[in-house]
Every structure is written in C-alpha cells, then in structure tokens.
Image (tube, helix red, strand yellow):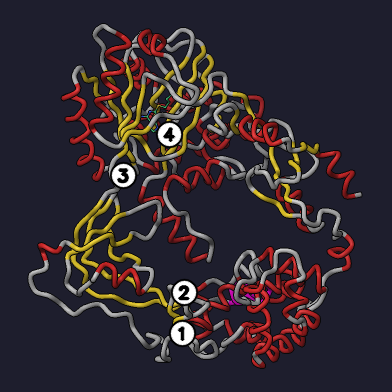
C-alpha cells in the first residue's frame, strides 16, 4: 500500500470511529488505539502535504491560525420562531394550521436546544461551509471552528443530495460549561453566564485549537435544499442521521393536539436528565409541501412555533445563610442549600442579593425554598413553600457586623447593599483589590491568580498592591505548589507591569466608579496622577461623561492619606503615573460630544481599534442606533436592521476611509 492509499484508508477508519464514538455513543476501539491511528495519519499528512484535505479527521484538532471571520450571505435567511408559553397558545397555533390547510397534517415535535444556531452547507458529501446566524441575512463563516466539533460530520456516508444545507444548534454540555467556568474563575477571567453564551463565544474564537478543546456538541434539526430525499421533515432528518448527522431521537410526529400535549409534558420531565440545556419545544408542520403552503410572516414561519418551558424550579432546604465580602466591601448574602438537581447541575448555593430580598421572602432557617435558574450562573431563591414550614427556624436577619473582620456594617441611604467600611484591614477587600490590580484589563499580570494571592497574603508577603514590587524569586520559590520556574514567571510578570500605560494603572488602582473607560478619560484630560489627585469636583465633572458620583469617588479615594502613600510607593517602584506622549498625540477633541455606532466589517483596522480611536479622540462608542447617534462608522455588510433604522432617523453613514480622514 502506498502512503497515499494508507492516508485514505486511515481517514475512512477514523471517520467511522468518530461517528461511533461521538454520534452513536458506542466506541469500538479504545481512546489510545484511536490516538495512535490519528497520530499515524497526522505524520503521513505532514510528509505528504499534497494530500491536504479540509475534511480529514486531523482537521478536528484545529490550528492556531488567526483570521477575521468572513461574512457570508445566507442562501435562505435564518428566521426565528414565534414563542408561546401556554398550552392554549399551542392550541391556537394548531387551529390556525388546521384552518389554513383544511386537510390532514402531522406536527413534528422536537426539543428546543438552548445553544447557538449554525447553518452547514454540504456539497458532494463534504462539509464546505459553516455560518452563524448573524443578523439572519448574513452570518460569520466559522467553518474552521465547526470542523473541530466531533459530532459534525466532515464527510457523509450513504447517498445524500449533491448539495444541501442543514441547520442545527451548537451546544456546550453542562459538564463542559462548568469545568470551563471553574478554569476561568481560577484565571480571574470573567465567567460565562450560561452554556448558550459560552457556545456562541467559543464559535467566535480566533484560535480553532482552543475551540477543539472546548468539546462543543451539535444537534441538527432543519434541512434545506432543492433535492431533499422526501416531503417529510421528520423523514429527511432520519435520512440525515444515516448520513452521519447527530439528530435527536426525542423527535416525534403527532397527529392530534393531545399527542402534542403529551410530548410537552413528557419532555418537561425528561429534559432535566439531559446533559445539555433546552428551553422549550419546537412544533413544525411535517410536510414540506404544507409548509410552503403556509408560508412565512416577516420574521418567522407560519408552519412552526416554539413552546417555552417555565423556568425550572427545584425545592430544597435552606440550611444556612453565609455572607461574602467583595473588593469594594459590599456584603452579599448567600443561601447554603441541601444539594438539589436543577437543569442538569447540582445546586448547593443561591444568591440572595441583599437584605431587602431576604425580608421580602420572609426567610427562616430550615425553610423549604424554591430555587430557579434564570439566565445567570448563580441560581436564585424565588419563594418559600409555606405548607412545608412545620418547625419554624430562626428568622434570617442580615448580619450587622462584617463576617470577615467584625466591623459594624453600614448601609448608604437609598442603596440596597450593606458595606464593610474597613477598607484598610478587611482581608477579602485587600485580596480583592490585588486581584483586581493583576486582572487582564488592569495590569494583566497573568502569572498571578487568586490562589497565589491567597498564599502571598496568608504568609504576610503581600498586603497591598505596592508590596508586589518588593518580591523577588527567593521569596516565592519555596511556597507550596511553586517551583523556581513559576516563581520567575511571577517576578517577570510583575516587572513587565512597569510598562503598563498610565490609563490602565489608573483603572487598576480600583477607585470606586472608575472603570476602564472613565480611567482613560481622566488620563487624557489630566495627563498625570498629581493633577488628578489635586483636582476639584468642578474640574473633574468638567470632563465629558464624568458626573458627580464618579468625581466624588475620585476625591474620596485621594482624600485618604493611605492611598496617597500607596501611590508614592508605586511611583518609587517605577510605575508610570503620566500618559505616554503617543497617547496624547493620538488624542484629540475632534469627536467630542459625538455618539458613534460601529457597524459592519472593516478592512483597515479592527473594530476594537476603531473603538479605541473614537475614545482617544473624545467621542463615545455606543451600541445601538438612536436619535442621539451622531453618525455610524459603517463598514461592509452592515446589518439590514441597523441600516433601516439609520435611514429612518436620517443618520449619516461614514465610511472607514472618511472616518480616518476625519482624524488626520
Ligand atoms: S427550527 C424556521 N428547531 O430556536 C425555523 N430551531 O427561535 C428554524 N432552536 O434560531 C428553526 N432548537 O437557534 C428549530 N429543534 C429546533 C430548535 C431550534 C433550538 C433555536 C434556533 C432558532 C431559534 C428560533
């Protein structure tokens, strides 16, 4: 056998095992055997580059090539579905269809997967393109990323149409989602609120090797094309399953409203056992001929509808309320619960937000409480099952002293939150400020995570951010779970933070209400820390977008002698307390008072760079078009809805070149 033949053979063997493993869930060889075959193929492909094939199983591991996504026009627009929330609305849909068709029909009932939708194009049995929904008309070409999803076949088997599209949902299973968030928490990165956002975010990553590691999954639920196998939606998906696609086996054809209701009730129970999120049921008229007859409204098909499940709720016992203290001293109550299963995960804790919420719920320890998961990671308590309150426990009263340092808490009039005012000594506040300082958008010292901070703090090596600059490798080398290499890494990270520009350092100081954008504005207007420290309320509020609340935050911060000392220690350590010449040179007031929307795809700079330019020149980058938008910085392929809105409101479109010329 020649190497070329072996390559083809290996590809075919690996495709089959991939399918057995990921789609059928029935592996026939061990992981190690699989890896050995895959490695053999990788080696052969590397030495035979002319055999490159984008559908090879080796492409599943991704590559680190960075690319901006190409925008692609959908051949058939990607519409959304009308939502219903009750069985009577489902009955209305059913009756509408019945009247319009005036003949027998079947409804295909399916789960509504809660991920991000994708449209796949296959030609001659090969995956040629994968496009996100985008604005429904155009989406991003994320083919390289989708190739890494094991359940998306790169090559089909059997006899399939010459060309067709198949749409479905890319999902991140609960288990992967939780693990990912755990890792992000350790790294001090922002958490994903739910698996849907995590899946969508992952598909948009530039590095497909990272996508490959995120273990996404995909269910397909909608086939489009000129020569589909049958007139039945359900039947076509059964064919798709034969060709290698993952199609849910919970789909069911129903002939009566009663059967539909049964499906809904059954699935509302079954879905709780599923390893991924679902948020409802989708009902589709099964016959494609009948679908065409029913047609579309402007936004959605008349032949399909979604039924949304009520938020899932579990009942469990409230064991204890504990309190967390954040970097700014805000005290958040947390309910500790008897572990309970809720939409795929075990819930042990729920946020209670603040004292008012506790009072409104009239919570007592030992109560059986309702727990719901909204779009958030942390579930919330929505009520108490009063019938179950047999033995009344202690009423939950918000603590009056800081659980960490014992200082009496304060509550500012009109605010819901309680604060611990002991900024100087309260440990979670001290550690929180260091965590904020090293975080990515601040000084970006990524060699230091929360665990390292915990250790350094516990050993008394670092009590505030200026202490970081007194460390050397010998202080760190012998700490638990640390070696010479990680110690050096940490020191190198701290050292390179000396070059971080002033505006980010200003943000990193953690002044109340001074976020990254406000810090940039302050840096641009005042140029250096001394001017900011001495600024009056009037001088501060004279800066665009800086109101009394922020200005007071700044004044209070520097009124504290300790903070002034901190600044001096940092200055001595070599940190930059004035803006770079370049930052000033690139800055101007040209866009002062202007609200600018960025839309479309650009060729000369990235979106982020344009955002930066707008801010540097005194303008404000806003997300959506409104009456107060000054102009739209419009690239190619601007979304049709934005375009329409701009036209209606008579807002000017400025091209990339015109914009750059404006700044010259
Ligand atoms: S069919 C024209 N089937 O729900 C109808 N959509 O609100 C095309 N979704 O954008 C969609 N599960 O992302 C269909 N079994 C399912 C679905 C499903 C989830 C999502 C999809 C779509 C949205 C519509």
Closer to the camera: disc 2 or disc 3? Answer: 2
Q: Quadrant of ligand 1?
A: top left
Most extreme residue toward the left, as rendered? 390
Q: Which residues are magenta?
A: 484-492
On screen, residue 367 versus residue 236, left or right, reads left
Asked if residue 389 lies in the magenta stretch, the reply is no
Q: Main structural element of the magenta stretch: helix, strand or loop? A: helix
Question: Where on the picture, by quarter, is residue 495?
Answer: bottom right
**Disc 1 to disc 2, how far (Cα)?**
14 Å
Q: Secondary structure at mark 2?
A: loop
The residue at which mark 1 appears reads as: 420
- Decide which of 452, 615 is in the foreground and name it: 615
239 over 322 or under it: above or below = above
- The residue shown at (64%, 71%) is 514
The residue at which mark 3 appears reads as: 275
- Decide which of 180, 487 is in the foreground and name it: 180
The residue at which mark 2 appears reads as: 415
> Which of the marked residues, 3 or 4, is nearer the chain's N terminus?
4
Residue 314 in view, yes or no: yes
Instruction: State the image coordinates of residue 357 (x, y, percent, origin top left).
Output: 33, 68
**Disc 3 to disc 1, how far (Cα)?**
41 Å
Question: Dot 4: within a 10 Å radius of its alpha carbon, few (fewer than 14), some, or many (20 or more) residues?
Answer: many
Instruction: State the image coordinates of residue 188 (x, y, percent, origin top left).
Output: 53, 66
The residue at which mark 4 appears reads as: 169
> Which of the marked residues, 4 or 2, is nearer the chain's N terminus?
4
Closer to the camera: disc 1 or disc 2? Answer: 2
- The residue shown at (60%, 68%) is 439
Image disc number at residue 159: none
- The residue shown at (24%, 20%) is 253
> Which of the marked residues, 4 or 1, is nearer the chain's N terminus?
4
């Amino acid at each position: 056998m020649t190497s070329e033949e072996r390559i083809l053979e290996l590809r075919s063997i690996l495709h089959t095992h991939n399918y057995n493993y990921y789609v059928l869930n029935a592996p026939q060889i061990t992981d190690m055997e699989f890896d050995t075959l895959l490695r053999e193929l990788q080696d052969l492909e590397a030495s035979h580059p002319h055999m490159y094939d984008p559908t090879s199983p080796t492409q599943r591991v991704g590559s680190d090539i960075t690319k901006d996504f190409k925008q692609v026009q959908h051949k058939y627009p990607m519409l959304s579905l009308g939502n219903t929330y009750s069985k009577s609305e489902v009955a209305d849909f059913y009756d509408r269809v019945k009247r319009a068709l005036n003949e027998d029909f079947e409804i295909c009932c399916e789960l509504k997967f809660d991920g991000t939708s994708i449209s796949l194009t296959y030609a001659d049995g090969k995956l040629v393109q994968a496009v996100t929904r985008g604005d429904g008309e155009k989406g991003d070409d994320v083919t390289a990323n989708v190739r890494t999803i094991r359940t998306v076949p790169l090559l089909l088997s059997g006899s399939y149409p010459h060309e067709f599209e198949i749409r479905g949902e890319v999902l991140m299973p609960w288990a992967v989602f939780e693990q990912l968030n755990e890792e992000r928490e350790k790294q001090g990165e922002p958490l994903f609120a739910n698996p849907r956002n995590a899946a969508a975010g992952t598909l948009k990553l530039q590095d497909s090797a990272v996508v490959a590691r995120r273990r996404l999954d995909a269910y397909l639920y909608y086939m489009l094309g000129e020569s589909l196998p049958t007139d039945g939606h359900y039947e076509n998906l059964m064919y798709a399953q034969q060709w290698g696609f993952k199609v849910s086996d919970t789909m069911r054809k129903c002939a009566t409203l009663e059967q539909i209701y049964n499906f809904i009730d059954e699935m509302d129970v079954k879905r709780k056992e599923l390893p991924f999120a679902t948020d409802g049921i989708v009902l589709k008229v099964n016959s494609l001929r009948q679908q065409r007859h029913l047609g579309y409204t402007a936004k959605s098909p008349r032949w399909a509808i979604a039924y949304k499940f009520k938020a899932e709720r579990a009942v469990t016992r409230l064991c204890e309320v504990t309190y967390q203290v954040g970097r700014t001293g805000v005290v958040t109550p947390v309910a500790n619960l008897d572990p309970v299963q809720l939409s795929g995960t075990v819930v042990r804790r729920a946020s209670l937000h603040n004292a008012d919420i506790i009072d409104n719920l009239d919570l007592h320890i030992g109560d059986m409480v309702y727990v719901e998961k909204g779009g958030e990671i942390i579930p919330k308590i929505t009520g108490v099952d009063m019938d179950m309150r047999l033995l009344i426990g202690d009423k939950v009263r918000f603590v009056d002293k800081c659980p960490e340092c014992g200082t009496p808490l304060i509550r500012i009039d009109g605010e819901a939150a309680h604060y611990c005012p002991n900024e100087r000594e309260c440990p979670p506040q001290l550690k929180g400020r260091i965590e904020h300082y090293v975080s990515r958008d601040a000084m970006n010292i990524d060699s230091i995570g929360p665990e390292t901070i915990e250790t350094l703090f516990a050993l008394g090596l670092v009590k505030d951010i200026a202490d970081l600059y007194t460390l050397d490798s010998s202080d760190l080398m012998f700490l638990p779970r640390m070696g010479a290499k990680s110690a050096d890494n940490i020191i190198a990270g701290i050292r390179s933070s000396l070059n971080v520009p002033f505006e980010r350092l200003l943000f990193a100081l953690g002044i109340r209400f001074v976020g990254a954008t406000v810090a940039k504005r302050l840096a641009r207007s005042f140029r250096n820390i001394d001017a900011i420290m001495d600024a009056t309320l009037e001088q501060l509020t004279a800066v665009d977008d800086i109101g009394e609340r922020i200005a007071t935050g700044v004044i209070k911060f520097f009124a504290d002698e300790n903070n002034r000392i901190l600044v001096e220690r940092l200055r001595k350590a070599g940190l930059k307390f004035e803006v770079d010449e370049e930052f000033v040179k690139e800055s101007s007031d040209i866009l002062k008072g202007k609200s600018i929307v960025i839309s479309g795809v650009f060729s000369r700079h990235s979106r982020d760079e344009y955002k930066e330019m707008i801010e540097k020149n005194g303008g404000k980058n806003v997300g959506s078009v409104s009456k107060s938008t000054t102009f739209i910085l419009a690239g190619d392929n601007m979304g049709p809805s934005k375009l329409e809105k701009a036209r209606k409101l008579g807002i000017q479109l400025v091209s990339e070149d015109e914009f750059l010329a404006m700044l010259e």
